[in-house]
Amino acid sequence: MGNAPGAGGGSFSNVPGTGGYLGGRAGVSTPRGVPTSVVNPAAAPSPTALQMAITGPQPEPFSPSTAPLVGPLELPTGPEDDGPPDGLTLDQAIDITLERSRDLRAKFYEIPQAKADILQASLRANPVFYQDGQLLAYPGYRFSRSVPGGPSQYDTNITFLLDVTRQRQARTAVALRAEKVLEAQYQEAVRQRIDDIYDAYVLGALSARQMVRYSRVSVKGLETLYARYQELYKRGNASLGDLNRVKIQLRTAQLGLVDAEVTYRKAKLDLGSFMNLTREEVDRLELRGTIYDTLPPPPPVDELRRIALESRPDIISYRLGVQRAEADVRLARASRYSNPYLLFQPYTYQDNTPYGVRSAVSYALGVTVPLPVFNRNQGGIQRAVLNVTQTQIQLSETERQALVDVEKAVQEYDVSRREVNELANDVIPAAKQVRDEAFRLLGAGEKSLLEYIAAQQEFNQVAKQYLDTSIRHRRSMVNLNTVTGKRILQ
C-alpha cells in the first residue's frame, strides 16, 4: 500500500543504548557478558516498517480502448435498452470486485499484521536469570589457612528492566497510530480499485456495447438500401457502380459491426479480470446499465469540496500520519536515556568449609543506572520532529490536490453535460435532417449516390461525437464519487 504517512520519524523499536551489558551488584559478584537486548522486547527491527509494500506483481492500470469508427453509423430509435433485468449493474460489479479481488485481500492482511505489531510493542521486558560461581579452586588445590583463598561463592541473580522512561507505552502508542494509518491506506486502495471498475464498466463495457448497437442499426438500414438498389439495378434504373457503392458501404458496416462486437468482448474480459471472474462467467456476462444521464445534478461545488476533505481516505491517512509522527517524537524523547536495571540476588552461598567455620547464605539488592550524562538520541529526536513538519506539508498538499480534483471533476461534468444536451437537441437532429433529405432526394433522382454517401459520412462523425461525449459525461458522473471519496452519483 505504499509508504505509510508519518512513518519517516523512526521505528517504534528504535531504543538507543540496547547494545550495553547488564551488571550485578558491585564487587566480585558482578556477572559479565549479559547483553541488554535480551530484556528489550522491541529490540528487533519493526515489522511495520517492512509491511508497507505488498510483494508480487501488481495489476496494470486499466486503459480504456476507444471503439474505432468503421463504416456508417445510425442512432438507435426509441428508448434505450439498459440490458436484461438480471444483468450486471455497476453496484454489483463493485461488490463482486471488493469480495474477490486478491490484490485487496493481500493488502487487507496489513491490518492484522499491524495489530500484531501493537501486541509486540506492548510486551514487557523479560527478567534475566544468571547463575555463577566465583573464587573456585582448581582441581588439585584446596583452600586452607596455610593456602588462603576464597571463600568460594555461588550466586543466583535476577535482573529486571525498570521502564522509568515509559518507552513501552510510547512504542505502543506509535504502533496504534501506525495501525490506524494502515486502515486508512486500505480504504484508499479500495477507492482506487473502485475507480478502476468505473473505467472498465463505463469507458470499456458500456461504451463498447453502445457501439455494437449503433453498428447493428446501421447494418440493418444499409441492408434495406442495398435490397432497394438491387431492384433498381434489375429494372435498369441504377448503374452497377451505384450498386457496388452501396454494397461497399454495407460490407464496411458489417465489418464495423464485427469489430465492435470483438471490442465489446475484450471490454467484458477486462471487466471480468478486475472482478476475478472465470472465463465461463465472463462469457455469460450481460450488463444492466446506461451511458446516458438520468440523475439529478450533484450538490454545489462548495459542498463537494467539504465532502472530499472529510471523506477521502488519502487525506484521512495523512491526518492520522501526523498523529503517528507526533507519537514518534514522544518515543524518541522517551528513548533519550537508557532505563535502569533492578538486581535481585536472592541466593549467595559462601563456602567456608576449608576454614572450619560455618558456611554463609545471604542475598543482595542493587540498581544499575546508566548515568544520563549524554542524550543518546539527539539525531532521532531531530528526525522525528522534522518528520512531523514533513507529514503536515504532505497533508496540506494532499488536501490542495483533492480540492483541485473536485474542481476539475465538476467542470468536466458541467461541460460534458452541456455538450451532450446540445448534441442531442440541436446537432443530431440537424445532421439527421441533412442525411434524410439527401436520401429523399436520392430516391427522387435529384441527388447522386455519392452526395448521399457524403451526407452519411457527415452524420457518422456527429453520431460518433455524440457517443463519445455521452460516455465522457457518464464517466464524469462516477468520477465525482472518486474525487470526493463518497457516493454522489452512480
Image: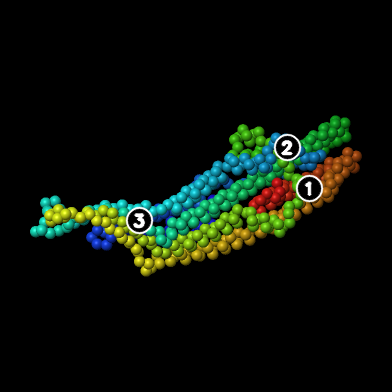
Q: Residues within 10 Å of mark 2 (few under 14, many from 20)?
A: some
Determine the CA span between mark 2 and mark 1: 25 Å
Q: Which residue is mark 3?
A: 160
Q: Position of 61 compared to 226: left or right?
A: left
Specify whether 374 is left or right of 260: left
In the rendered image, which quarter is residue 157 located in? Answer: bottom left
Judged from the image, the secondary structure of the residue bearing numbered disc 1 is helix
Q: Residue 303: x and y, percent? A: 71, 57
- Work out whether mark 2 precedes mark 1 in sequence or the reverse, and give the earlier one: 2
- Look at label 1 and name its amino acid: Val
Q: Residue at x 73, y 44 (%)?
A: 291
Looking at the picture, tell me which residue is in the foreground, 227 or 19: 19
241 over 346 or under it: above or below:
above
Frontmost residue, 410 versus 17: 17
Give the residue drawn at x 54%, y 58%.
321
- Disc 1 crowd rating (10 Å Cα; few below 14, some 14-19, many 20+) is some
At horizontal 73% and vertical 42% (from top left) the residue drawn is 290
Residue 138 in the image, given as x and y percentages of width and height? 15, 53
Whether 453 is drawn above or below 351: the answer is: above
Name the residue type under label 2: Gly
Distance of label 1 from label 3 (alpha carbons): 83 Å
- Residue 250's label in the rendered image is none
Q: Label 1 belongs to which residue?
A: 462
Q: Which residue is mark 2?
A: 83
Task: Name the element at disc 3.
Answer: strand
Mark toward the start of the polypeptide (1 vs 3):
3
Residue lying farthest to the bottom in this orientation: 373
Res. 165 visible in picture: yes
